[in-house]
Image (cartoon, rainbow, N blue to C red):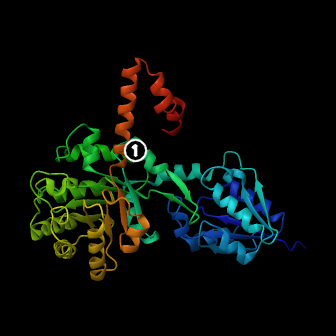
Amino acid sequence: MNDKTVYVAMATDVYHSGHINIINEAAKYGKVIVGVLTDEAVATYKRSPLLDTKERMKIVESFKNIEHVVVQEHLDYTDNLREIKPDYVIHGDDWRTGYMQIIRERVIEVLKEWGGELIEVPYTKDASGDRLSRQLNSTLTTSEQRLSKLRKLLKLKPYIRAIDVSNGLTGIIAENMRIMDESTMTAKEFDAMWVSSLCDSAFKGKPDIELVDVTSRINTINEIMEVTSKPIILDGDTGGKIDHFPFHVKTLERVGVSAVIIEDKTGLKQNSLFGTDAVQVLDEPEEFASKIAAGKRAQSTRDFMIIARLESLIAGKSVDDAMMRAKIYIEAGADAVMIHSKEKSGEDIFGFLEKFRAYSPDIPVVTVPTTYNQITEEELHKRGANIIIHANFLLRSAYPAMMKTAESILTHGRSKEAADEYCMSIKDVLTFI
């Protein structure tokens, strides 16, 4: 009887012939132990599983040729491998390239500690878990399903990383960009998308003064939703008039937006990053709280989030003023708060986070480190941030690149230099869209 042990890790909730083939191959080498990744581990590098860890373990236990099923807490195999010390690890050969290559190299190094061996099975033709997941995403990403994603991710992940998107193309970038963090052996991606009025306006060639109406904003959201599956957080500016805001909430809920952030300013909009260089008029806190309460009453589900954006620091007021407003808005029903600042040190943000976390350890806080971007996500999270939005960077990087291309064509009287230096190939363009 073969007393060798074989370890196989599984992260999916979409099982296909390729997985069965891996298990059958593994059984040829010894007793098969399957490590089922936890929901939290899966969420670090792909969509949140529809079935929780226990349900997925039960499914795997029902497969033939499996001796034992264990939990794998991380994408990195290290802890399980050192505990089990299998003679073999079996995996498809598809992880030799791409972001999983680092995990593969780590497995090989750890196996050397006791003479274990990695065996790679040729990937089963026409059986792609990623392809099936994408198909499942497109099938299951209804407005209702997308609406609930942000709240689910807040429970699954230490913090949410979002990036500003303004159209289908930037949405595709946010949807598909993924790297491996070698220091933590986890995959990193953007968890959500932030649709700001600044970038939405700029891509339409218009100033950021709430000139782009709600209908146009919804059109942009629909374009993004057609090609993505991640939750959307909308920049709702001031939320408009108090009598109008409940109707905006109903519309956003119906199309599947997960959250709207509205700011406690009034009058003609001046972008917050102008700070005190522009006239920033704060709304009366009780009046703004009434707007939040009206929006919460209009909700049809518990999933949609109304987030109160605190502009006290932008207007040159104190952390104490921001805290006073935060408490009033939470009492009115705000699901979270966003604290904004244009100061580069970030010390005022840290001051607010310290006081807010003393007031509430659980209510989510959103930060937007545009001006204080030397501070890492991890540091912001340690101080108390739950959602970290990287705003307007795709817009700001696209504009200079397009300017250089246009200038090069004018300078040379042809497009060759621009194409060679600044542009990706048409073939590559056709591949990612």
Residue at the far right: name it.
1
Q: Residue at x 70, y 69 (%)?
A: 34
17 shown above or below 79: above
Bin the neighbour count of mark 1 within 10 Å (Cα to Cα): few under 14, some 14-19, many 20 and up: some
The single residue placed furthest to the bottom in the displayed view is 358
Q: Position of residue 216 (x, y in %)?
A: 24, 43
At 59% from the left edge and 58% from the top edge, which residue is drawn?
14
In the displayed structure image, the side of residue 310 where residue 362 appears, left or right: right
Q: Is residue 149 above or below residue 175?
A: below
Does 406 appear above or below 25?
above
Query: Which amino acid is tagged 1?
Result: Thr
**In the displayed structure, does residue 178 sit left or right of residue 91?**
left
Name which quarter of the figure residue 5 lies in.
Answer: bottom right
Q: Which of the 4 quarters of the picture holds residue 388? A: bottom left
Q: Position of residue 44 (x, y in %)?
A: 52, 63
Tell me which residue sits at (41%, 69%) in the image. Answer: 379
List x then y, in percent, for residue 280. 12, 57
Element carrying mark 1? helix
